Amino acid sequence: MEPISRRSFIKNAATGAGAAAAVLVGTSKTTWAGANDRVRVAVMGINGRGRSHLGAYTKMENVDVVTLCDVDSRLFNSRAKEFFTRAGKPEPKVEQDIRKVLEDKDVDAISIATPNHWHSLATIWACQAGKDVYVEKPMTHNIFEGRKVVEAAAKYGRIVQHGTQLRSNPGFQEGINELKNGIIGDVYMARCVCYKWRPSIGKGQPGQPPEGLDWNLWQGPAQETPFMVNDKGEGIYVHYFWHWVWAYGNGDIGNQGVHQLDAARWGLGVNVPYRVTSMGGMFLWDDAKEIYNVSSTSFMFKGEDGKDKMMTLEVRPWCTNDEAGGTSFGVIFYGSEGWMTFPGYGSYKAYKGKGNELIKEGDDGDDMYHYQNFIDCIRSRDVSKLNAPPIQGHYSSALSHYALTGARVNRVLEIDTEKEAVKNDDEANSMLTRVYREPFVVPETV
C-alpha cells in the first residue's frame, strides 16, 4: 500500500505541522546473544495500565526496568516503593519527558501505557531512536497515525508489539484455530459486546493542574486547553476519564472494545471494512464526558473466500444482561453449524446444532504470555514471531475510529479499502486524522 498522507483523508486540510520532526538519535543493542541477554525497559505512563507493565517486567528473568517515565512526577515515589524497594530491587531512574528517555543509551525498549493520544507519536519517536516498543491499545488515536506507526516499525527495523494481549493467550489461540478449522462450519458473523460499568463523573470547569503534573507534556499532540477540575478542584479527566474526551481518547470502543474488535477480525479473517453503519449518543448522565457512552455499529467486509462477513459492536455503560458468557465484554461467532463464544481473554466455548450442544471449551490466559512474546522477539529480532504486530494493531484500532466517525456524521460510511478513507466524504475523513500541536507532530514522513 502507498504511504498515506493527511491530504488523502481531507482536501485542503491544515495539518498544524511544519516540516517532519527530525529523527531522534539513540543507541541500544540491535543484535542479541540469546535468551539470557538482559533487556532494559523504560515504562512510559505508570498509572493505571502502566502498573500492569511494571508488574510484568519486574517478574521476568533478565529484564530490568531502568526508567520510569510519566508527566506526573507525584507517581514516582509510590511506584518505586511498590515495585522495587519492597522487592529489594534497585530503584530505576525517573523522567517526565519521553524525549530525554529516548536519548538514553541504557534503554533498549519503551513500554507505553499513556493516554491514547500519545500512543502513536511515542511509538514513532521510539522507533526513530532505535528502541523497541510495546504500545497499549488502541495503537492509534486516529487512522492516519496507524499507517505511520507501521511505516516507522518497518523503516527502522524495530520490534513493535500492540497491547491486544488475547493474541498471546493459548486458550484464545486454540479457540481461533478451532474456529478456522471449521468447528462451527462456515463462519459468517461476529458479535462484539462491551458493557463496562461507567458512572457519572459530574461537570467540569477550568482550574489549575496540581504541582508535579506537566500539563503541557500531558496534552502533547492535542491542542492546548484548560485543565478541567470538579467542584473539589480535582482533575476530572486526569488520570482516567480522558477516555471520553475527543482530544485524548476513543471512548469505550477504543478502550475496551478494541480487544473484541481485534478478536472478531482475527476469527473472521478480515482487515478493512467496505461499509460501516454506526449510531450513538449520551443516553446516561449529564456529565463532562464527550464521547458516546451508548453506541451500536455494524461493519461489512469481504472475507478471504470472497464472501461477505459481518461484524457488530454494542457499547453500554451501566446495568446489562449476560450475552457472551459475561456481563462486561466478549465476542460471539456464528457459523453454519453452530456458534462460539469468547467471554474473556483466554477462554472459549463452542456449541453445535439447534440444541446448542457444548462440543469443546478451553481456558488459558495471562498477560505474561504477551509481555514474554515481546521480550522473546526483542532477543530474536524475528518480527514474524510477534503475536500482535503493528499492522494488526492498526487494523483493529481503525475499526474503533470508523465506528465513532460514522456515529458522529450520522451516515453510512463507504470505505475505499485500499486507501482506508471514506469515499466522497471530506467531513468523515477529517475525523480520521487530526490537527497536531507543535512540536508533538506525527510526521508525514517517518
Image (spheres, grey):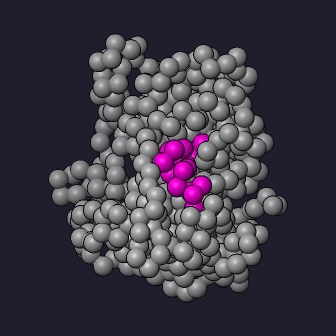
Outermost bottom residue: 411
Q: Quadrant of residue 58?
A: top left
Which residue shows up at 27% across the image and 72% down it? 321
Q: Is residue 234 magenta?
A: no
Above-or-below relation of 330 to 20: below
Outermost left residue: 232
Q: Position of residue 36 (x, y in %)?
A: 60, 16
- Side (left or right) of 249 relative to 87: right
Q: Position of residue 416 (x, y in %)?
A: 73, 76
Q: Position of residue 404 (x, y in %)?
A: 50, 72
Query: In the rendered structure, which segment of residues is drawn in magenta?
Result: 161-179
- Side (left or right) of 327 relative to 1: left
Q: Position of residue 219 (x, y in %)?
A: 47, 50
Q: Main secondary structure of the magenta part?
A: helix
Q: Is residue 166 magenta?
A: yes
Above-or-below relation of 53 to 249: above
